[in-house]
Amino acid sequence: MNEYSTIIGMDLGDTYHHYCVLDTSSGEVLNEGRVRCTKAAVERLFGELTPTLVAVETGTHSPWLSRLLTELGHEVLVGNARKLRAIYENEHKCDGRDAEMLARMARLDPKLLSPIRHRSQQAQADLAVLRSRAAAVTARTKFINHVRGTVKSFGLRLPSCSAPAFHHKVRKDIPEDLHPALLPVLAQIESLTKTIRGYDKTIERYCEDTYAETDVLRSVPGVGPITALCFVLTLEQPHRFKKSRDVAAFFGLTPRRSQSGKSDPQLRITKAGDCHMRRLLVGSAQFILGPFGPDSQLRQWGLKLAETGGSHAKRRAVVAVARKLAVLLHRLWVDDAYFEPFPDKTHPPQTGTGEATAAA
């Protein structure tokens, strides 16, 4: 039985939050309404209420709102919006009904919401640096592709070069007719490159001064400060996972499953969780399997997997290595141990632990 006399469901909007108050015992709707999407308005409404259970969905406003409601003494359930098909596929969907449905699901069984836990405000702020850097890199890539495509339409090709050196290397090769169109774009590319370098220095400083645990993660070839810091900030607390293998599922790197009777087809990965972190893990896996990756037990395992399995074997091998890499990084973090390329040669095998070794 729920310990609270009432349960509140809130459908979060960009201007107003709609709420529905249910009686825990009878399930009757006691009150409905909406509140402005501001901290002051939420404080006025919920500050006068006795502690209760509040159910919301993940969204732009759910991090700050859940922290504020917790400070006001309420218990907050943040439902995974991707799992709540009963809400987003409702034939009579509206904000009021969504709020009521959240309250009823929380009253019946909170696990129906597939609740998640938001990271701390400081971790969210530090992670925003990584997100902003990724946005700047994406914008620079689009500008570079625009310049190359425009020049190509004139029957010319720009020389190959790295993205940071692009605005210097190609300036002299741009046709004079295209100077009014493309030189301002090159100026934007140069500005973005300086911005990205500034983010890189900030990330390096975070790793050295604030998040020293990234040092052991960076001992793995292909894992740099960006991947290591993003991994630490995304998980925030390593001991929230009982097994390191659960981290791979958390990042959406495990296969989906749709078993019914004798049918149990092999499906693609779930792609759940943080897509930015997943891309970084895949990028690190590509380096490990690439020509510059140093030899290790993990690399040998991935290359062997890439040799079998048909035309998509290499792609599957990259995802498989990324999955093992996620498990490995968590294990190194928990054990505070540095990466060993061939742990079996230095340590006797351990059985019965159910956890990953240093080579995952």
Image (cartoon, grey):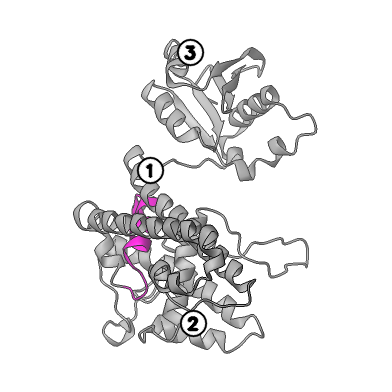
What's the magenta region?
Answer: 220-238
Q: CA distance from mark 2 to mark 3?
A: 55 Å
In the rendered structure, the answer to whether residue 197 lies left or right of residue 326 reads left
Q: Position of residue 102 (x, y in %)?
A: 62, 29
| 251 or 205, nearer to the observer | 205
Q: Position of residue 273 (x, y in %)?
A: 52, 53
> Residue 256 is drawn in which quadrant?
bottom right
Q: Of the residues tagged 1 and 3, which is closer to the observer?
A: 1
Question: Mark 3 and mark 2 in contact (Cβ < 8 Å)?
Answer: no
- Which mark is drawn over residue 124? 1
Q: Is residue 237 visible?
A: yes
- Which mark is drawn over residue 200? none
Q: Any magenta on residue 126?
A: no
Q: Any magenta on residue 234?
A: yes
| 31 or 239, nearer to the observer | 31
Q: Position of residue 144 (x, y in %)?
A: 51, 65
Quadrant where the image shows the C terminus: bottom left
Please give the name of the residue rendered at 57% of the width and 63% of the height, measured from the top-left corner: 146
Indicate whether 320 appears above or below 233: below
Q: Position of residue 147 (x, y in %)?
A: 54, 65
Q: How many marks?
A: 3
Q: Residues within 10 Å of mark 3 (few under 14, many from 20)?
A: few
Question: Mark 3 and mark 1 in contact (Cβ < 8 Å)?
Answer: no
Name of the residue lying farthest toward the front: 176
Q: Which residue is mark 2?
A: 302
Q: Which residue is mark 3?
A: 45
Q: CA distance from mark 1 to mark 3?
A: 26 Å
Q: Earlier in the sequence, mark 2 or mark 3?
A: 3
At label 3, the amino acid type is Leu
Q: Earlier in the sequence, mark 1 or mark 3?
A: 3
